[in-house]
């Protein structure tokens, strides 16, 4: 039986566990803050913007090629990141005027920080239906 005048002292194991848990929680909090700061500094365009720019260049190609009225409907597109920074290959499909299915591969590059401006993008490579239309820049 315990003496009522004695002060209860937590076991050393419990104190070590509490200290260890506090260190882990502090470490996780510091890591979260650092990751958030790094992500805030990296200005990566959303995937929808990268796809929209590639589709813009495909549409622009047809606009310059044809003086007639044209209509393009794009299908789902996929992004394939490239080893170079600010460079993506977009693969997708589209239907042009006569409901004929087409495919495209567009290599687009972000050339300035404002990714929401068309002027900040460049089309380096374009292939439509496995035919190379444009091949500018370094090899991928």
Image (spheres, helix red, strand yellow):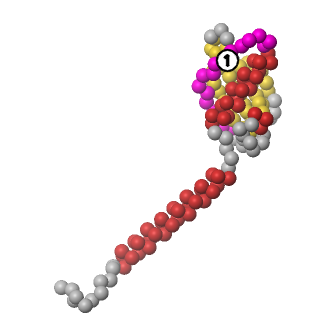
Q: Secondary structure at mark 1?
A: strand
Q: Which residues are magenta?
A: 66-82
Of the 4 image quadrants, the one containing the C terminus is top right
Instruction: Identify the residue at image location x=64%, y=19%.
Output: 73
Q: Please, is residue 25 above or below residue 106 in the view?
A: below
Q: Is residue 15 left or right of residue 138?
A: left
Of 65 and 86, the residue lying toward us: 65
Of 96 and 11, the residue lying toward us: 96
Instruction: Identify the residue at image location x=48%, y=65%.
Output: 25
Identify the image quadrant of residue 124.
top right
Q: Give the percent coordinates (x, y) of residue 12.
A: 36, 79
Q: Residues within 10 Å of mark 1 (few under 14, many from 20)?
A: some
**Residue at far left of view:** 1
Residue under pointer 1: 72
Q: Is residue 91 left or right of residue 110?
A: left
Q: Is residue 5 left or right of residue 75?
A: left
């Amino acid at each position: 039986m315990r003496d009522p005048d004695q002060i209860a002292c937590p076991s050393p194991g419990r104190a070590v566990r509490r200290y260890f848990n506090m260190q882990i929680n502090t470490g996780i909090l510091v890591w979260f803050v650092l990751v958030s700061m790094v992500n805030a500094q990296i200005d990566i365009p959303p995937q929808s913007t990268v796809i929209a720019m590639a589709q813009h260049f495909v549409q622009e190609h047809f606009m310059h090629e044809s003086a007639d009225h044209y209509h393009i409907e794009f299908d789902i597109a996929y992004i394939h990141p490239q080893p170079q920074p600010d460079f993506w290959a977009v693969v997708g499909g589209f239907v042009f005027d006569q409901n004929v299915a087409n495919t495209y591969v567009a290599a687009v590059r972000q050339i300035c920080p404002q990714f929401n401006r068309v002027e900040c993008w460049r089309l380096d490579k374009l292939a439509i239906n496995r035919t190379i239309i444009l091949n500018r820049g370094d090899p991928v």
